[in-house]
Image (cartoon, rainbow, N blue to C red):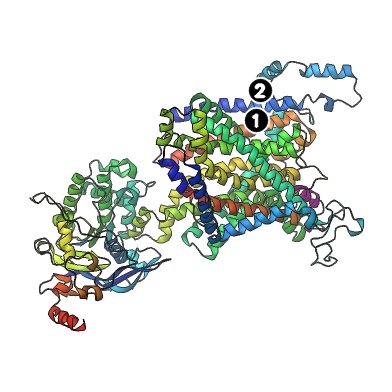
Amino acid sequence: MWKYLAKRLLQIPPVLFIVTIMIFVLVYIAGDPVATMLPADASPEEIAQFRHALGFDQPFYVQFGNYILDLFRGDFGESYQYGTSALGLVLERLPATLELATASMIIAILIAIPLGIISAVKPNTVIDFFATSFSVLGKAIPNFWLGIMLILVFSVTLKVLPVSGTGSYSHIVLPAITLGTAMSAEITRLVRSSMLEILHQDYIRTARSKGLKYSAVVIKHAFKNSLVPVITITFLQAAALVGGSLITEMIFAWPGLGQLIIQAVYAKDLPIIQAAVFVTASMIIFINILTDIMYRVLDPRIKFN
Amino acid sequence: MTKMLEVVNLKTHFYTDKGIIPSVDGVSFTIDKGQTTAIVGESGCGKSVTSYSIMRLVDSPGKVVDGEVIFEGKDLTKISEKEMRSIRGNDISMIFQEPLSSLNPVVKIGKQLIETLILHQKLTKKMAKQRSIEMLNKVGLPRADKIYESYPHELSGGMRQRVMIAMALACSPKLLIADEPTTALDVTIQAQILKLMKGLRDDFDTSILLITHDLGVVAEIADKVIVMYSGQVVEEADVFSLFANPRHPYTKGLLNSTPHLDDEKDDLEPIKGNVPSPANRPTGCSFHPRCPHVKAICRKESPNLTSLGDSNKVRCWLYEENQEELLYAENIGR
Amino acid sequence: MELNNQAELSPYPVESSRQKENMSKKFLVLLKKLLTSKTGVVGLLIVLTVCLMALLAPIIAPYDPNKIDTANMLKPPFWLVNGDLSHILGTDNLGRDILSRLIYGSRISIIVGILSVVVGGLIGVVFGLIAGYYGGIVDSIIMRLVDSFLAIPTTLFCIVFLTVLNPGLFTLIFVIGITNWVMYASLVRSETLSIKEREYVKAAKTIGVSNFNIIFRHILPNVFSSIIVISTLSIAGTIITESSLSFLGLGIQPPAISWGIMLSEGREHLATSWWLSTFPGVAISITVLGIIFLGEWLRDVLDPRSRGTKS
């Protein structure tokens, strides 16, 4: 196991390095931001001086070298908007995003697992029809529209939940549903199809031949087998959540990383964007490795090599 | 001898898109206490479905549509699911053909073993573990405590089948149904498993219903043999008369197509033709297209399962008492 | 799959005339199978309708989609009070006809959806073939590149690129396409890995067929049906990505019409005029649904391995 882990961990640096290059190239293409940072009536001398101070007059490789050196110190530069450390701003916003992601994951799992199991145990019934429709619709409906529609129904029309912002538990409900629906749809689909397959396996018949209740057979024997793919997909979906939270946070004015990124995009605040991409990528790589390990721990048939 | 289980006119049909398939079509037989009864037949003859029907484990689209399964005075086809569950794994237990796929791959052997004991014998976890390890020892597994903590994929095929047997016998069932228990195993392992089953039958005083296509296995372990063809019983006999004096042409064919070590004869005679598909059975006696003794009446009418004086029975026009009369009537008809 | 089997058995390329005959036969079989799958038919009908809408927009749209009509601002759909049949789905804050805008909006969705899949598909297939066929260090480099792209969520990737590039139709297609290539690369790579071990590829190698020819005549045709399936399904994703980006103001720029733009404009009038932000979303969802149905049906028919449970 340790050998496998070491091998997996060794794959991180090159991936992060490529991500870094991609971010840098992007910033390089963008050209220097000096023009947007100084007042419109700045003199050419002032601009040149400012460029020099920030190192934008250096050749490509020097800029890249400096960039990498800064990276090792965790320095992505200072936000153009706030004038403070970009990484600091990103890390400050991270907890809110994680809170939202956790809430939507919980909602997604609470809906998906029972729904998937029941629809597999009772195929071709009303609930099965509902589950399959849900799993297709959840994928087809864009989450930002779902968010708007939820606001329309629950905030504007019924006035039972707040439109946006934070402060109470009721604030997290709509954004969490918005973010969790697509994930839930995907998990429902997977639980259903893997359970359908598993329920026809020989060991299910064995379990039934022991005199166990069917519900016990389903939960203790069948579901345990579908846990492996379900947990894998849940973790992979968690990575997608980070992406999905961008628009959701914007719509609901949720003060997380997504909102920070969108604001930075409108303000062309590149240091924040770089730091945010780097942090997001690191998180996703970490989640992927965790998924791999979980997968191996859960299925005793897979060996670590 | 006392009856352990009596199956009367059992019919199990499968409702598929292509129509109703009568997989088991009026099967009757009895299993005596302490005896091993074997059901023999080619694949598709309905022998496995018969065993699942007894256990009420036939999956949709299959359904037991008629008949009785009498066990200790109760008709298993009529009792509630709850009552049936208290019999499964406790009074009647089952082992299957594929020991690997029949054991849950992500659950440790020990956990799969204690499950039945906790459920039926109401043992505590600790007692159940003790009993399980005893059972593993009894089925000849060395280092039982290590196997208790293993996953199925870590064991060999023979060991897995021993585990299955230990699991099935944990609650000392009155009847053990073994569905092709040795088919997936190597020949040497087969012999060991059969020997084990024989030993345990005597130790636990368990009756066995053995489902197999292998006459070698039958000769080894069975007391009584039921030959099935196309969803019906075609011959029922004690093991000695079956091998010495097979009655039904199909039984004869099966014996002739089985290799014997001590036989001088080199060439086997396979039965010509194929097993008819259950959806599309021939009229009359369903064996008639392959039968070397086929007569006109065989094509028209199905013969009855006729007793031959002793406990042996056969379903064939060759043995009908009033055969002559029928033949005569047939000739007149022509 | 008759065609594939034949190609597998023979060490030589299948004769083209026979291939053609088989193709038309196969097409008929496909069509027959399509008609037996309800969701497949529904999917096909939806996709055809949307394509026709996009194609015939100037003919079928009742109004000029950008015509501002201050006399008829925020008019509700016909079944509500104050609504009438002159504007079936109502008008927006500038009095523009929503139905006409929806019809024109389908053009962007279809164009961006298809072209970005083509861009991503081309890049991904080429990289996947190279990685799978040559293996070794090339494979490792490409796979690390794939990992890096997977580490950045699609929306984030697009947003970041669109911040520094000039927004517009082609930038959008290019950027969405780029995020897509990873999927094709990993699929084609894994299939190439297994196909290159088959007898007929080995046979071709021993008789001196060039690598280029092996890749394009033996491997590519065998991966083709999987590519078709994945492309169809991923159009659904690209349409959603396009509408999200346009919704954020980073994609298509007005006065061009996109369902995403309509949604973001309508959002400001959510409290008073729900129809502004409802109909574009319905249009996106139905289109995506149709594509998913069609794609899943194609997968069931073309790819016997992944024949999942029928829904």
Question: Residue B314: x, y in percent?
Answer: 16, 70
Residue shown at the point (91%, 55%) measured from the top left: C70
Residue shown at the point (19%, 56%) measured from the top left: B270
Residue shown at the point (84%, 16%) measured from the top left: A49
Chain under callout 1: A
Q: Secondary structure at mark 1?
A: helix
Residue C36 visible in the current orientation: yes
Q: Nearer the viewer, residue A159 or A150?
A: A150
Q: Quadrant of residue A269?
A: top right
Which residue is the site of mark 1?
A278
Q: Secondary structure at mark 2?
A: helix
Question: Residue A150: x, y in percent?
Answer: 71, 55
Residue numbers of the magenta segment:
C259-275
Q: Same chain for the residues at labels 2 and 1, yes or no?
A: yes
The amino acid type, in three-letter code, at marker 2 is Leu
Residue C271 in magenta stretch: yes
Q: Mark 1 Cα within 10 Å, few/some/many (few <14, many 20+)?
A: many
When the figure is inspected, residue B208 is found, relative to residue B189, above or below; the finding is: below
Q: Which mark is residue C290?
A: none
When the figure is inspected, residue C310 is found, relative to residue C130, above or below; the finding is: below
Which residue is the site of mark 2?
A71
Q: Quadrant of residue B158?
A: top left
Q: Nearer the viewer, residue A131 or B294?
A: B294
Q: CB of mark 2 within 8 Å of CB of mark 1?
A: yes
Q: Quadrant of the N terminus of chain A?
A: top left
Question: Residue C72: x, y in percent?
Answer: 89, 59
